[in-house]
Amino acid sequence: MNISQAAQASGLTPKMLRYYESIGLLKPAIRTASGYRQYQAADLDTLAFLKRARDLGFSLEEVGTLLELQRDRHRASADVKALASAHVQDLNCKIEEFISLRDTLQALIDECQGNEDSACAILDSLAGVRGKSV
């Protein structure tokens, strides 16, 4: 199947397939005599793996490690679990950061009068002005 078909089947874009190939996450595709990429069933399995891993928020480096672990039949599942657990810890930190950002922004929204007056707690905060509106 060609790159467009493989992209459609995997839910990725042709650009992403070329990128994954360029960084070594996807083995170079077989080329036709005219130079077009041709993908096999095993390539689609790898693409599905890549997409699922990226959808779960793993970094490209982590995805590479997961691919290596998947291909290594002598791996310890503890290695996979450790990587996934570290990723969950990173996600939890990001969630806490987002909650803090949300709470800060919500407090500024609550302070803003939202009327015809030019005073705005949101803009004052972004400008570093405390306690008075410009």
Image: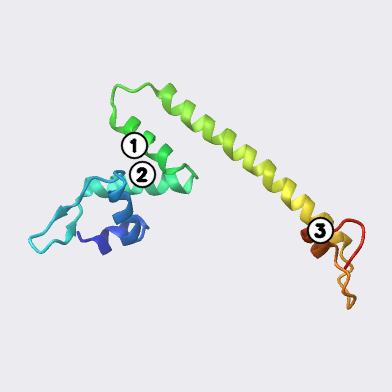
Report the residue marked by disc 3: 125
Upstream in the sequence, badge 2 or badge 1?
2
Q: Do the residues labelled 2 and 1 touch (CB within 8 Å)?
A: yes
Image spot of residue 27 (x, y percent): 23, 45
Residue shown at the point (35%, 61%) measured from the top left: 13
Most foreground residue, 7 or 116: 116
Answer with left or right where residue 62 lies relative to residue 38.
Answer: right
Q: How crowded is mark 2: few (under 14 residues within 10 Å), some or many (20 or more)?
A: some
Upstream in the sequence, badge 3 or badge 2?
2
Q: Are marks 3 and 2 in contact (CB under 8 Å)?
A: no
Which part of the image, by quadrant, shows the C terminus? bottom right
Q: On screen, 4 above or below 71?
A: below
At numbered mark 1, what does the secondary structure look like: helix, strand or loop?
Answer: helix
Q: Which amino acid does label 1 sit on?
A: Leu
Picture quadrant where residue 73 is located: top left
At numbered mark 3, what does the secondary structure look like: helix, strand or loop?
Answer: helix
Answer with left or right where residue 117 lies relative to residue 40.
Answer: right
Q: Which residue lies furthest to the bottom in this view?
A: 116
Report the residue marked by disc 1: 67
Most foreground residue, 81 or 89: 89
Q: On screen, 130 above or below 88?
A: below
Q: Residue 49, which numbered label?
A: 2
Most foreground residue, 10 or 32: 32
Residue shown at the point (13%, 56%) measured from the top left: 31
Report how far apart the C-alphas of labels 2 and 1 lie in the structure.
8 Å
Q: Do the residues labelled 3 and 1 touch (CB within 8 Å)?
A: no
